[in-house]
Structure formats: structure tokens, C-alpha cells
Image: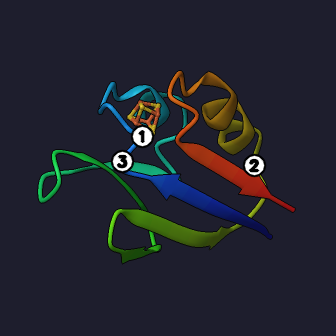
Amino acid sequence: MKKVTLDLDKCVACGMCVKVCPDVFEADMSTLKVALKGGTKNGKIWTAEIEASDCLDKAADMCMMNAIFVEE
Ligand code: SF4
């Protein structure tokens, strides 16, 4: 399992993470940004424990705002 953190203050809603890894990220109409599926939102920070997947790391690498953090 990996711990994923998503910072909505940094996210500019480009949609890249949803396109690259839809199993983990989804569009969130309540914030007009993105959400972590199965995650918990505390203020502007989403966190989730997620099964390791190639697309998760790829999405974190591709996020131009560095809004996605993945820890082992
Ligand atoms: S790739 Fe980054 S900036 Fe784009 S929607 Fe996802 S978290 Fe936000």
C-alpha cells in the first residue's frame, strides 16, 4: 500500500491525473478539482491508502503543479 496526498491548493484542475490514472483520481464537482477515490478530505488536503500501481506513480510524475505526493 502507498500513502497518497493531494494538495488542492496546488491543483489547477488540468485533469491529467484523472486521464492517466482513473482508478485513483476522479473529477470532483464540489471543488471543481479532483478527488482521491476512497480517500479522506481534510480542508484542502486529500489523503488515501492505495494499492501500488504504475499509473499512480505516473500521475504524480506528470502533475505539473507537484500537487500529488506518493509515499511507500
Ligand atoms: S494532474 Fe495535478 S494539477 Fe492536474 S488535476 Fe491532477 S492534481 Fe490537479
Residue in the image at 57% along x and 71% along y: 48
Q: CA distance from mark 2 to mark 1?
A: 23 Å
Circle 2: residue type: Ser
Instruction: Please tell me the numbered disc located at residue 25.
Output: none
Task: Give SS at disc 2.
Answer: loop
- Residue receiving disc 2: 53
Q: Does the numbered disc 1 mark a residue whose Cβ is under 8 Å from ligand 1? A: yes
Judge by depth and name the residue closer to the eye, 60 or 53.
60
Mark nearer the N terminus (2 vs 1): 1
Where, by quadrant of the figure, is residue 31 drawn? bottom left
The quarter in which the C terminus is drawn is bottom right
Check whether the beta carbons of the residues at disc 1 and disc 3 lie within 8 A of each other: yes
Task: Give SS at disc 1.
Answer: loop
Where, by quadrant of the figure, is residue 56 drawn? top right
- Residue receiving disc 3: 9
Check whether the beta carbons of the residues at disc 2 and disc 1 lie within 8 A of each other: no
How many numbered marks appear? Answer: 3
Q: Residues within 10 Å of mark 2 (few under 14, many from 20)?
A: few
Residue 43 against residue 11 in the figure, above or below? below
Q: Mark 2 or 1, which is nearer the eye?
A: 1
Q: CA distance from mark 2 to mark 3?
A: 25 Å
Judge by depth and name the residue closer to the eye, 56 or 70.
70
- Residue receiving disc 1: 10
